Amino acid sequence: NNRWPNPPSTTVESGQAMSRHRAVRALDYDDYYDDYDEEDIGHEDDHNVNIAAMSPGTASYMMPSSGDANYFGFNTANRAPQFNIVDAINRVLEIIGDRDPAEVRIAIEQCSYDIEAAIAYLLESIPSAPEPLFTDELDMESELVEPAPVLGSNHLDLGAETSLFPKRAAADTVNAEPVVIPKPSAMAKSLMSNPSKQLADVKLPPKPATSDAFAEPFQFDVPSPDTRARTAHLKAAHGVPRQALSSTAPLAAAPVPAVKPAVAVKGMSESALRKRQEKLDRLIKLQEDSPASNLNLIVVGHVDAGKSTLMGHLLYLNGAVSSRDMHKYEKEAREQGKASFMYAWVLDIGDDERSRGVTVDIATKHFNTSRCHVTLLDAPGHRDFVPNMIAGASQADCALLVVNAINGEFEAGFDENGQTKEHAILLRSMGISEVIVVVNKLDMVHWSESRYNFIVETLGAYLKTIGFRPGSIRYVPCSGLEGCNLVKQGALPAELSAWYSGDSLIDMIDTFKIPARPILAPMRMVISDVFKSQALGGLSVAGTLIQGCIFPQDRVLLLPANQVVTVKNIMFDTNDTVDVAIPGHRVEVGIAGVSDDSAVTIGSVLSDIQKPLIMASSIQASIVTLEGMARPILPGSDAILHSQCIEEPCIIAKLKSLLHKTSGVAVKRHPRLLTASQRADVIIHLNRPAGLEACDLSKQLGRFTLRRDGRTIAVGVVKRVINDKS
């Protein structure tokens, strides 16, 4: 039974040799190469072998007899005899911090293996300050462009650190033998003596010519073996191969779908169109003479921050709630043993909200300041009702972020399980750039100035990291229950007036900027409520008009039902009907001509007939994953997409490219997964068509949030609508 007729001796040397050969025979090469990616330094074909990872014996065995040092595609002509590329990369990473090892290796090779030059080269690309989570590119101020990274050239874009990525600790590097470093070159001395020298002025030494097609670290023009195998598999499965995108050229412009009515409809008569145009001309002239002054304001914050009490008391002091109604709320609250909730009941009108003592749905009220008419949206603070908060934030122009000043309460709302950070991120992702931080319940800590300053410093630093400009953030101390510093009525408490002499809350609200309203754009309105109303003539819908305008007797398109309906009446703010609805107005609209009332649902869209909204079954989007994402996003991962009042299951079908956090440059094609705090281009398939539009066409319809397992995992903007899921 002895398999070895001449068993080797039991010396240590021979035993080690047997173990090594048994390990080689049992090696699963599929698992061995599974962690290599076609974009990373690794095995792109049979000749691209990492010499630095070999033992000297293996390298000498596999090296051709001619002794060609560049056989494996690496520039080794300028290496020192004992130069180790792995040790060099680790040494560079110890000095410059967290960078992609592939980028470090490219820099070392470009600098002819001069370590000092490579360090100076990489340090030139590190910004002096951390970049915010949301940048202008994500805000879609200009169209997102995906230029190709110029790797291996004289102008390397090696990325930048941000505050979301921790620096590499020295202990993370691999312990290795000392590295024999070549003497610094003239270029290294020049860079180190003049750090401010522009990188564009530095000419890197050219690489030695080589005939190997895979000599460059990244060669996306030539398909890798994995790409060829994937193409062959897809061709066998579907009959048509899918060509992998090349990162050496920007993405081609997406084809713009033809704007056609979703159904063939008979247009309005010439006389009706002429009358409507006359109304529109008068409206435009009226807006030029006296611009619209309606402002949509949302109130957000952690649960029990006192949002409803704060705004209910403000409405009462401002005259938006009568003394008679306030007396009724006080009486009802006392009967249930909740006298301190009397101001909250101005906004929390549902039985479940009053019994639980928390806001569940968006409450809408109106009040006036000396400059504008404000539509108030009171959002729930509990984590179970974040989708309702998203629906309200998508309709708002600005926000109040309410925090609880009581010791321990602010910290509870600000930690990872609180809603203060999440609400702030959602506000920014919805395009809200102005916010007032209301430090509420400050009377419970005796109007402490130190406590107020601590909250301002802590929250201000965080808001800056997620993209809020310092000039767009203001702070006000107050007490919602006591009504202190809400309006300019009466003197402030001595403890507060000793150190605060700024504006009251309502004065600060009056300084919000009113955004421009796109009256002439194609009409869009997302339905947030469906009900019956005698005043409006039967079936009615409510929502905020996003763009365009609506007149009574207009014919509009109901999507996705694809039915043409007639506008009967319009109601805004009061119980009186109005002659027109303009963007920014939260209105109630009576409609007629619906074949089945069940076709009108929350999330449906009223659209212009001549330039209708193209309902999206799939979208290409740019997303940013958040810090709290516990599980990575893989191709095929499911999530819930939230936009306006839309709440639709979706599948993240494809990860097209990983983008640089601030510049938007594609740094990797088809990543295997997305982890926290990353930015990427993705393809998303929706379970049902939804009212989404490219962000450069409609900023409100082009923003969305992805949630999974009751938590927000990513926010993003729509780059284009794709109706063909293939």
Image (spheres, rainbow, N blue to C red):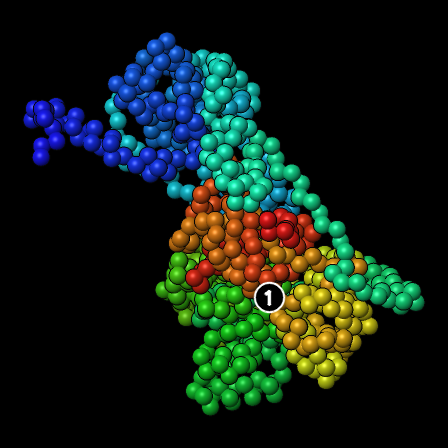
Q: Is mark 1 on a helix, strand or loop?
A: loop
Q: Position of residue 131 (x, y in %)?
A: 50, 42
* Number of marks in the rendered image: 1
| Near-viewer residue (315 or 546) | 546
Q: Which amino acid does label 1 sit on?
A: Cys
- Label 1, residues with CA under 10 Å away: few <14, some 14-19, many ≥20: many
Residue marked by disc 1: 645
Residue at 74%, 66% in the rendered image: 557
Indicate left or right for 371 with 334 as reference.
right
| Near-viewer residue (472 or 108) | 108
| Near-viewer residue (286 or 73) | 73
User: Which of the 4 image quadrants contains residue 37?
Assistant: top left
Q: Can residue 216 be seen in this view?
A: yes
| Near-viewer residue (228 or 300) | 228
Q: Is residue 368 visible?
A: no
Indicate left or right for 510 with 577 as reference.
left
Residue at 43%, 20% in the rendered image: 73
Q: Where is residue 644 in the image (x, y as percent from the top left)?
A: 60, 63
Residue at 50%, 74% in the rendered image: 359
Q: In this view, does 113 lie above or below 677?
A: above
Residue at 63%, 83% in the rendered image: 322
Q: In this view, does 70 lie above or below 716?
A: above
Indicate left or right for 717 with 36 as reference.
right
Q: Where is residue 290 in the image (x, y as percent from the top left)?
A: 80, 62
- Of all residues, the one furthest to the right in this rendering is 271
